[in-house]
Image (cartoon, rainbow, N blue to C red):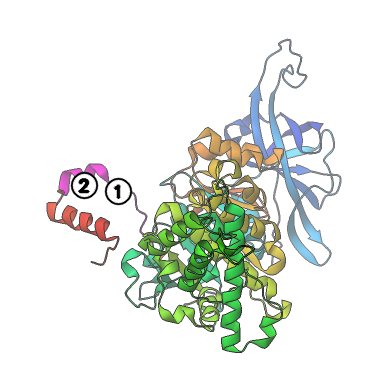
Amino acid sequence: MLERKFKFDNTTKIGNIIYVDTTQVNVEIRNENIIPEIVVGHMVSIDTSKKHIKIIGLIEKVIRKHNEESEDDFECISKDMIKINLIGTFKSTYKSQRNIFKRGIENFPQIESFCHIVNRENLEFFMNILSENKKDSLHIGTYSIDKTGKAMLDGDKFFQRHAAILGSTGSGKSWCVAKILEKVSQLKYPNIIILDIHGEYKSLCKNPDAIGKYYKIAGPGDIDEKNEETLFLPYWLLNKEEILAMCLDTTDQHAINQSARFIHHTKELKKEKLETEKKEEILKSFTVDSPIPFDFNKLIEALKEDNERKGAGKNGNPIKGEFEDKLTRFIFRLETKYNDKRYGFMFQSPEECQNYDWFHKLIYKLIGSTKKGEGIKIIDFSEVPSDILPIITGIIARILFDIQIWMKDEDRTPFTLVCDEAHLYLPKKDSANAIEKKSLYNFERIAKEGRKYGISIVVVSQRPSEVSSTILSQCSNFIVLRLTNDMDKNTIKQLLPDSLKIILEQLSLLEIGEAIVVGDSILLPSRICLEEPRKKPNSDTKKFWKEWNEKESSEEKLKKAVEYLRGQNKNN
């Protein structure tokens, strides 16, 4: 069997190195016949002092300059030249292995070293090496410069080190997510939770060949219906900071008293529940933030008693009580939230949600992965009002992170949170309100500490400039589709090393379904064509011109939509 290797000759030679630094080299073009093939973003191979080692780079700039005075030594040279960003090292032999590519530069090229363009058979050979080195990894498409080379990601590095899938609306983000989920579903015990903000991934859960389990956060129209797909998140799952952020006005002069009485009574009611359940060990160490069911009506009653209770004077005569009339506004806010059907998933949940053993069943729904086809969980938030969206996503993130922290190391199963439309609930901290900050804290904590506990995040957004910079800065992998907004492009560039920024200059030129992949999960920063997923999300762009010509607007359908809006339920 013939040994495969790079085959360079005078027809592939570009020229010789005339300048070297730690990240770039400059090459003087000495082969005029190769000029038509020299394109920004194309791959080149550079010789080193060791025959079995070559440096792989990408062309950043092509320049033709005549003799002109200039302060820049590079610019004043009267030659055709190219600038090359150094990407990695190729070794034809390494110990007992053959044809290995690694990121980073071990042996820098010398002045006058030869530089060759990597094209045709050499390009196919190199791309196949990248694919073959990761046969069991995540295949999401093909390389744009060579459609025969499969674009493969390292599945471990992609999920364990956080990732971001970014691109303008209609660029193909949903297809990219669907393709990744399709590949993950082929594993025995996948464990992924998709926070589906617009309900577009529900189609992935339809038989035949469903690749996940569908759940829906209970909307106002789901409160009185029992459905296995409906999720409730009762109020007792919130910690004191989260519920006080919702109900406490910190500018109220009695806010300290209101907070103190709320914490006192909540802890007492949780203690009462533990005593009823005879949980003696838990009683010794529980806190007010422990997720233990309690009766919210009893909490309101206890606060009302505080608010109305008179104090006793020296002679036993009634005087104004310690908390009298100081809790009125707080009680009103609590009752308003309790009666608001938009918050029904918290305050009007079924009776079984008050059972002590209900909590672990919820956790199993979310991160259990023992049954075929149920390891991928899609949670539909489409009927949840946008102003309370951060609350719900934050609760889910926090309780799952807490479970991982308190689980023994050997018992943990890693899982990933896919945050679709992340800019809607993971905003930059400076622009977040009090409720959003509580949610943001939970996700930022996962971004910074989650790796140690087997939990990661995949951020999906069309506006990276509006997403928390703390979370994006912790992402080690980026799949970036077409972006046209300068603020969004600059956000991405700031997250990458200087040597890779030239790659992102192509973002505005990408076709729909094309992406640039950069990060730990791929050996070579690459422009790829995403494969079409087998099951497609409901995210297709409407064909305005065609539908304006073929489809009339029905009064009856509009009437139904009005009724859905009034009843906050699409099932009426």
Instruction: Give yes or no for residue 404 being in the magenta stretch.
Output: no
The N terminus - image quarter: bottom right
Residue 515, horizontal then vertical, whole percent: 52, 48
Residue type, mark 1 in image: Lys
The C terminus - image quarter: bottom left
Going by the image, does 156 lie left or right of 143?
Answer: right
The residue closer to the viewer here, 558 or 132, is 558
Residue 263, horizontal then vertical, whole percent: 61, 65
Give the alpha-carbon distance from disc 1 to disc 2, as whole Å.
8 Å
Residue at the front extreme of this rendering: 315
Instruction: Give yes or no for residue 550 being in the magenta stretch.
Output: yes
Residue 291, horizontal then vertical, whole percent: 58, 73
- Above or below, comparing residue 112 to residue 520 in the picture: above
- Above or below, comparing residue 411 to residue 344 in the picture: below
Q: At 66% from the left edge and 65% from the top edge, which residue is drawn?
A: 156
Q: Secondary structure at mark 2?
A: helix
Residue that numbered label 2 is attached to: 547
Q: Are marks 1 and 2 in contact (CB under 8 Å)?
A: yes
Residue 309, horizontal then vertical, whole percent: 53, 65
Q: Report the span colored magenta.
A: 537-551
Neighbour tally class for label 2: few under 14, some 14-19, many 20 plus, Cα within 10 Å: few
* Quadrant of the image occupied by residue 306: bottom right
Residue that numbered label 1 is attached to: 542
Query: Could you tell which of marks 1 and 2 lies nearer the N-terminus?
Result: 1
